[in-house]
Amino acid sequence: VYDISSGALVPSSYQPLPRSPYPPVPDWVPYIRQNYILPSQTEGVYLYQRCPGAVPEGEGENASCATDYDFVVYDYNLQVILHILEDPNTILMTGEDSLGRPQGYSNAAWSASGRYLVYQYIRPLNSWDLRVYDMVADRNLDVQFWNAEIDPRRAIQWSPQGNRLAFLIVGRAGEPVAGDDPRILRHLVFYDADQERFQVADQPFGMAAGLNIRKTGTWSPDGSAFAFIITDQRLIVADATTGETTQLDTHVERIFAWVPTNEDVD
């Protein structure tokens, strides 16, 4: 195989390192599996996995950081780390993989303004919880109000204004009811980051394994409501302030967009 970039013959098994579309950040190893950079809406601010010394071990998809790594928010313009994703509960309770290294983040997402960063982390017994970090106040917001597990396979979505989150928890918010099936039962929850307040939808719904609220749900333009599709293809709209849900239609496969008036979903 002839490598044009280096002008040399290389073994057929050779794979050139991927070129990052982002500027160089300290101790980032682009060819470690799942070592993604997540750019903020604030120009030059990135979330990434930092590997001290940028020294990997292993090859290809099996490559990993040879030293303890962490996750940092870095400002490329100022050339400074703004925040390290460390939380006492994460580090002390689980916070490590089978090799004794800190766990990573999942379903991380920046708010539209770049002020808030939400991500999931693993807690005991492999259940998932939520963290919301406020870049302006430099603190984690209070998102611990019940012993519920966040569904890690389904997306967490910020409202267009970047102050409200929509996400799903496993099972029912509150005491279980006879006949509940936690394998498919999911409860939609809203979180207002500005007010640090939750609002739970007035009822849970069955969500098939393939349904992801990123693909089948969308916020209204003003961030007041969230429309999503449940297992039996019913279209549901939930009020983000009251939690009231309304069925709009049946046999719906996909939501495309809200019209600008916020009153209808196409």
Image: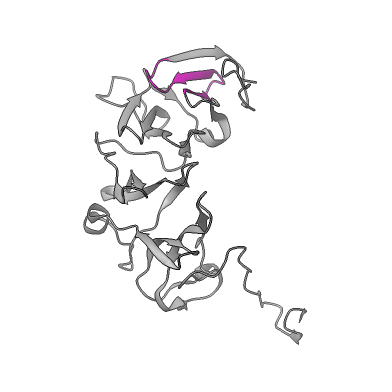
In this view of the protein, can residue 194 be seen by the observer? yes
Quarter of the image for the N terminus: give it. Answer: bottom right
Q: In x, y percent, where is residue 195?
A: 31, 32
Of 238 and 139, nearer the camera is 139
Q: Is residue 83 magenta-colored?
A: no
Residue in the picture at 57% in, 35% down: 215
Count of numbered tags = 0
Residue 79 screen position, x and y as percent? 45, 68
Q: Is residue 229 visible?
A: no
Residue farthest front in this picture? 78
Q: Residue at x 40, y 54 (%)?
A: 105
| Applied colour scheme | one colour
Q: Which residues are magenta?
A: 224-244
Vertical comparison of 122 with 80: above or below: above
Q: Quadrant of the C terminus?
A: top right
Q: Is residue 188 left or right of residue 141?
A: right
Q: Residue at x 48, y 58 (%)?
A: 46
Query: Residue 21 is drawn in which quadrant?
Result: bottom right
Percent from the top left, x then y, of residue 236? 51, 18
Residue 231 part of the magenta segment: yes
Locate residue 169: give its quadrant: top left
Q: Along the horizontal axis of the image, is 141 left or right of 164?
A: left
Left or right of 7 in this view: 69:
left
